[in-house]
Amino acid sequence: MRRYLVVLAASAGVWAQSVYAIRNAAIHPASGPAIANGTIVIRNGLIEAVGTGVAVPADAWVVEGAGFHVYPGLIDALSKWGLPAADAPAATGGRRGGSEGSEPNVQYLDDGGPEERPQTTSWVKAADLIQPGERSIASARNAGFTTAIVFPSAGIFAGQGSVVNLAGERAGEMVVASPVGQHVSLATRGFSSFPGSLMGSIAYVRQIYLDAEHYRQAKAMYAQNPRGLQRPAYDRALEGVLESPRVLLPASRKVEIDRMLRFGKELKTPFVLYGGTEAWRSAADLKAAGIPMLINLRWPERDRDADPDSKESLRTLEVREFAPGSPAEMARAGALFAFYASGLERSADVKRAVKQAIDAGLSKDDALRAMTWNVAKIFGLDDRLGSLEAGKIANVLVTDGEWFEDRSKTKYVFVDGKKFEPSPEPEPAKPAARRADR
């Protein structure tokens, strides 16, 4: 006897059933062509089968998918969802005297000199900071996101990123992989302390990687033949750098992209760029270098509080107009790229930003891959995430129309095979009316 989906919610829109079949739906695997009328079976947190002619198991709850579209769960390629709001880290912590804890209230190693690595918390892992009840997790899931690549973000070497599924009662059951990279910014501290300039920040990052390589070699030499050798002192900052399989470097403008392509090669570790506002100028260079780009979906726009009579430079206007075309140029060049929401949580806001890229020439298929499969490939997780294929984690988005359509709504979200029904999104707050000058 076939069972059909009825309202038996365990709690707060979460379903405890472990076997589902969505049939007669339009399925968009991301890793291959769309399936016009297919079936996907989810069992015990994994995709059991997907395609046409798939038999519906007798023990499955059946979702009649006529008119529905099924996608891989969306993945945010660079996120802070689920992390606590970080306090401003202390400027100094004394020689090796910083707090052993992690964000918030983390203290940097710094006694005022560059040798103590100010603004470095490379050992901090996002996986250790996740708060399952943090509000942004549910908001992002309602928008269709099932996974986020989460990074600490305070300081120059902010810490190690983790891949986190956006559901779970405990942090441990949310983590898919960790660590997956080291988040680096080029923050400065003013000319009163080091590093006080962009040049100083670049020199600082370069020195950290030189130190890390020397540290690695010293450890290897000691491990091979410790007798007669003084053991290397443990250095948690360098350990954190060496543990990270790749580094994320900031690059939005073309000059920054060019600089980071050269600089990244010096570090002798795999690297990924993030920002990408002017990737439309550098798509061919990124393709030639084989370096992925994470593109910020917060397109440049005029500040709402800006003086309406103020003049804007031609360059500012040009960047604002052409930035949404960066993804299309990257796709045309064959360069690997992915999107990150940069704090956008509402489905309507994310969709609006992606549609701007589509209106600028990006295909819907490439847009989908930039939010799913490409993210998984960049972080080495395409064997388990990012597409609808048998054996992969059952992170699935179901909508009542094409996701890119304005009127389409999220019907269901499956995270690790658990079914969620999104709650209605609150209307965005209207900006306060401005008082007329008197």
Image (tube, helix red, strand yellow):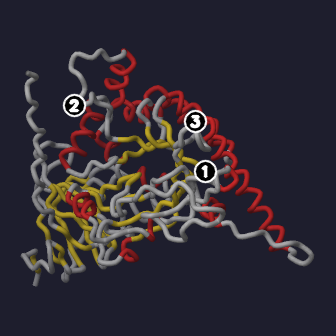
Residue designated by label 1 = 270
Residue 116 in the image: state x and y as whole percent: 66, 56
In-image side of 26 versus 150 (left or right): left
Q: Are marks 2 and 1 in contact (CB under 8 Å)?
A: no
Residue designated by label 3 = 198
SS of the residue under disc 3: helix
Q: Earlier in the sequence, mark 2 or mark 1?
A: 1
SS of the residue under disc 1: loop
- Please tell me which residue is depicted at 73% across the width and 51% down the height of the picture: 210
Q: Nearer the viewer, residue 18 or 59?
A: 18
Q: Earlier in the sequence, mark 2 or mark 3?
A: 3
Residue 122 in the image: state x and y as whole percent: 57, 60
Mark 3 vs mark 1, foreground winner is 3
In space, the residues marked 3 and 1 are separated at their CA atoms by: 22 Å
Say what amino acid the circle numbered 2 marks.
Answer: Arg
Residue 326 drawn above or below residue 130:
above
Quadrant into which the N terminus falls: bottom left
In-image side of 83 versus 346 (left or right): right
- Identify the disc placed on residue 304: 2
Q: Earlier in the sequence, mark 3 or mark 1?
A: 3
Is any part of residue 338 visible from this angle? yes
The part of the image, by quadrant, that contains residue 163 is bottom left
Say what amino acid the circle numbered 1 marks.
Answer: Pro
Residue 230 in the image: state x and y as whole percent: 86, 72
In-image side of 326 versus 231 (left or right): left
Q: Nearer the viewer, residue 310 or 9?
A: 310
Quadrant into which the C terminus falls: top left
In space, the residues marked 2 and 3 are separated at their CA atoms by: 29 Å
Say what amino acid the circle numbered 3 marks.
Answer: Leu
